[in-house]
Image (cartoon, grey):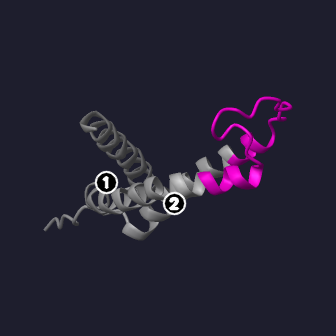
Amino acid sequence: MDVVDAPRRASFGLSLLVALGWYATVISAVFVGRSGIPAAPRTDCSVMFSCLTPYEEFGLLVLVGSPVLVGLLVCTLVVAGLLARLISSPIVAGTLSVLGSVVVVAVVGAVWQGAR
């Protein structure tokens, strides 16, 4: 008799590690790109947030970016859980979960901005 094995599922943990790796890659790339750009001397500080030190810029980024990052991580958890059941490769499931969560957060942000 021919026994058909159940389709192999991707590991949720490995899919989540791939997704977190994508987030770490993007954050590292932005940090390296930002630190490699020489700053032009600032002579006009009349506009709000125009004369921030790098430490103050980092603090503002953490203050504004933390809610977005938390939203992305929550969406990634949900989407990775759903995709790990459907896709057999954890690399593909993790990558698609990041892409899906970025799309979800972008749509929610656009709707929220439109409702304001």
Q: Is residue 34 magenta?
A: yes
The residue positioned farthest toward the left in the image shown = 1
Kindly report the secondary structure that dominates the magenta region of the rendered protein: loop
Q: Is residue 113 magenta?
A: no
Q: Position of residue 116 (x, y in %)?
A: 28, 38
Q: Which mark identifies residue 20?
A: 2
Q: Secondary structure at mark 2?
A: helix
Tell me the number on the disc at residue 87. 1
Q: Position of residue 46 (x, y in %)?
A: 70, 32
Q: Is residue 16 shown above or below 40?
A: below
Q: Which residues are magenta?
A: 31-60
Percent of width and height locating residue 105: 35, 46
Residue 101 in sight here: yes
Q: Is 114 on the left or on the right of 62, as rendered? A: left
Q: Which mark is residue 4?
A: none
Residue 24 seen from this side: no
| Mark 2–mark 1 distance (CA, rounded to whole Å) | 18 Å
* Residue 89 shown left or right of residue 42 in the figure: left
Seen at 84% across and 35% down, the residue is 38
Q: Is residue 7 above or below residue 37?
A: below
The amino acid type found where label 2 is placed reads Leu
